[in-house]
Image: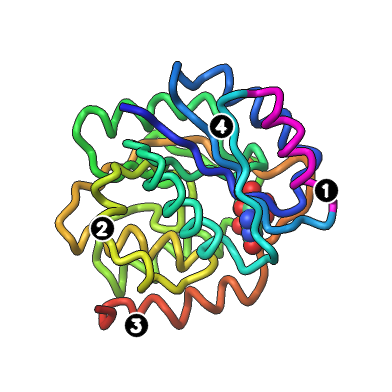
Amino acid sequence: MQATVLVPTYNESTNLEAMLRALAGVLREGDRVLVIDDNSPDGTGEIADRLAEKLSFVEVLHRDRKEGLGPAYIAGFRRVLADGAELILEMDCDFSHDPADVPRLIAAAEEGADLVLGSRYVEGGRVGNWGILRRAISRGGSLYTEAFLRMGVSDPTSGFKCFRRRVLETLDLGAITSRGYAFQIETTYRAKRAGFKVVELPITFVDRIDGSSKMSKAIVLEAVWRVPLLRLAS
Ligand SMILES: Nc1nc2c(ncn2[C@@H]2O[C@H](COP(=O)(O)OP(=O)(O)OP(=O)(O)O)[C@@H](O)[C@H]2O)c(=O)[nH]1
Ligand SMILES: [Mg+2]
């Protein structure tokens, strides 16, 4: 199945080239990468264009401004669905997600999962070098989400995912308005509710080494108020 990896970027000039080269080493003939850049002030968009000229598996989607991960991914989903992608992956550009895990996510989808989650909190999963506060937010977020949504998912905020095309075709992308962590929770919740098979695979997640975090209080608060409301969503 043809796979396209979506890599959203905002100020990832120090990471992008290394990430694309790492993906080149694990993707198969015909697989593609779409970089979704929100007009990064550090020039990531121009670096992406330059790399796309050299690397034939890379394309770039430029957006005018930063609106959060959710709208960036929705724009990316629409683009790659139109281009015929069969498997659509989400992945951060900061090496928190190991490119070496990409083939395992793809394989699990090819073996029958509709949505594969790279999970820190299933048996065999791990979080490296994160401070106590980030660990607590992430763990607390998972427990909070499970308390309201009862999805049976250990790591609902994970941003390392692989969707089968039919999942994204079925979800009403226009109805998804979450921007941060809530976006990851919402897409998985909607997929589960539509009856799709969700599988979690253990991953080791590490903190970024280069560049700066875009995590904010607003992103956490958005998840806090949105999660209970998801149950009411159409
Ligand atoms: N296009 C786009 N990409 C974004 C936006 N916000 C974050 N990203 C990218 O999404 C990925 C995850 O963002 P991070 O900054 O790592 O956020 P995080 O993983 O929540 O936080 P840290 O791991 O602490 O850095 C990275 O590749 C970012 O560059 C955005 O508004 N638009
Ligand atoms: Mg990150």
**N-term-proximal mark, 4 vs 2:** 4
Label 2 sits on residue? 191
Numbered circles on residues, count: 4
The residue under label 3 is 229
> For the residues marked 1 and 3, what is the alpha-carbon distance in whole angstroms?
37 Å
Q: Is mark 1 within 8 Å of ligand 1?
A: no
Instruction: Report which residue position mark 1 lands on.
Output: 43
Q: Which residues are magenta?
A: 42-55
Q: CA distance from mark 3 to mark 2?
A: 16 Å
Closer to the chain start, of discs 3 and 4, is: 4
- Is disc 4's CB within 8 Å of ligand 2? no
Per the model, the C-alpha gap separating discs 1 and 4 is 24 Å
In front of the other: label 4 or label 2?
2
State which image quarter holds ligand 1. Answer: bottom right
Discs 3, 2 touching: Cβ within 8 Å:
no
| Residue at the left extreme of this rendering | 195
* Residue at x-position 26% and y-position 83%: 232
Mark 1 Cα shell of 10 Å, populated few (<14), some (14-19), many (≥20): some
What amino acid is at disc 3?
A: Leu
Q: Position of residue 49 (x, y in %)?
A: 72, 38
Residue 184 position, x and y percent, is 43, 59
Q: Can residue 162 be spotted in the picture?
A: yes
